[in-house]
Image (spheres, rainbow, N blue to C red):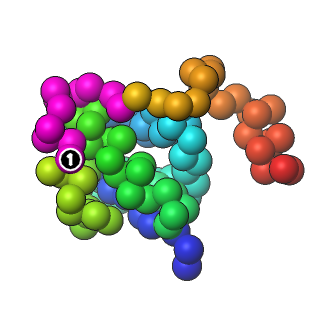
Amino acid sequence: MNCWTIWVERDSGWSGIEIERLLFRYGVRVWGRGFLDDRLFFRVKKRQARWAEYVLLRCAAPIAGAPFDSRNYDYAERHEPGAEPVSRRPRSKSPDLVEQLLAFVR
């Protein structure tokens, strides 16, 4: 499969939709969302997994599963906890159903 599963603790203060909106702002689409026991999970494209993991760590979301790239922990520690990385994309609102359908068709 050409995807990576990211796990986050359910009691971390982060909801699934907050994570999805955060990653969407940085160009990462998620799918295959769910939860198992005390963890949330979702999938991202494997080519975006390193970036998605880095964004989450920079924003202080506790990743609960195996890291895609363990160097991301070191990179994220170089910044203030919770400090979002600079995005090169213009800020847009969170994806609504119409935007998701249009993205799927494209």
In the rendered view, would you say 83 is above or below 42?
Answer: above
Q: Secondary structure at mark 1?
A: helix
Determine whether 11 is above or below 53 in the image.
above
Q: Residue furthest front?
A: 88
Question: Can residue 62 be seen here?
Answer: no
Q: Which residue is mark 1?
A: 75
Q: What residue span does the magenta drawing correspond to?
A: 75-85
Name the quadrant of the N terminus. bottom right
In the image, what residue type sits under mark 1?
Tyr
Residue at 13% in and 41% down:
77
Residue at image point 28% right, 64% down = 69
- How many labels, in total? 1
Q: Quadrant of residue 91?
A: top right
Q: Is residue 103 visible?
A: yes
Count residues near mark 1 (Cα–Cα under 10 Å), then give few for <14, some for 14-19, many for 20+: few
Is 41 in front, or is 72?
A: 72
| Residue 66 % position (x, y) | 25, 66
Task: Say if 67 sits above or below 86 in the image.
Answer: below
Q: Is residue 83 magenta?
A: yes
Q: Residue at x 27, y 37 (%)?
A: 58
